[in-house]
Image (cartoon, grey):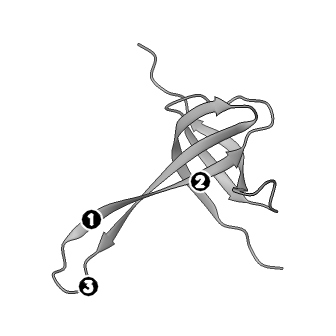
């Protein structure tokens, strides 16, 4: 059985019901010039209990398709957002 990908990212939107938008940031090196760039990918993740809030750092895991764009599920909240 194949292992499922687990990545961590920051919640950038929590306006939907049972769904959060998570931004994953990675560094990519340019093949010709060698300069590193930051690339960001956003994923919709299922959050059953609506626990993740804006700015939280969360761990998400691949899962079966839940809807047209939702293929990830929030497994844990790694770090809560800093309150003002």
Answer whether labels 3 and 2 touch (C-beta < 8 Å).
Answer: no
Relative depth, front residue between 39 and 15: 15
Left or right: 71, with 81 as reference point: right
Q: Between disc 3 and disc 1, whose residue precedes?
A: 3
Q: Which class describes the residues within 10 Å of circle 2: few (<14), some (14-19), or many (20+)?
A: some
Disc 1: which residue: 37
Closest to the camera, between mark 1 and mark 2, is 2
- Secondary structure under tag 2 reads strand
Res. 52 mark: none
Secondary structure type for disc 1: strand
* Crowd band around label 1 with a 10 angstrom C-alpha radius: few (<14), some (14–19), many (20+): few
Q: CA distance from mark 3 to mark 2?
A: 26 Å
**N-term-proximal mark, 1 vs 2:** 1
Residue 55 located left or right of residue 2 = left
Can you name the residue that lies furthest to the left here?
33
For the C terminus, the quadrant is top left
Please give the name of the residue rendered at 61% of the width and 32% of the height, measured from the top-left corner.
14
**Residue at 56% in and 46% down:** 22
Of badges 3 and 2, the one in the foreground is 2
**Displayed quadrant of residue 47:** top right
Image coords of residue 56 (percent x, y)? 54, 33
Residue found at the very far bottom of the displayed protein: 32
In percent of width and height, residue 39 lies at 37, 61
**Residue 68 location, x and y as percent?**
75, 57
Q: Is residue 45 above or below residue 56?
A: below
Q: Residue visible at 64% across and 39% down?
A: 20
Secondary structure found at label 3: loop
Residue position for label 2: 43
Q: Earlier in the sequence, mark 3 or mark 2?
A: 3
Q: Which residue is mark 3?
A: 31
Image quadrant assignment for residue 38: bottom left
């Amino acid at each position: 059985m194949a292992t499922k990908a687990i990545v961590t990212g920051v919640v950038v939107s929590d306006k939907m019901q049972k769904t959060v938008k998570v931004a994953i940031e990675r560094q990519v090196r340019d093949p010709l010039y060698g300069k590193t760039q930051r690339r960001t990918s956003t994923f919709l993740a299922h959050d059953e209990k609506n626990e993740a809030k804006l700015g939280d750092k969360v761990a998400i895991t691949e899962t079966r398709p839940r809807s047209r764009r939702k293929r990830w599920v929030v497994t844990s909240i790694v770090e809560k957002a800093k309150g003002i």
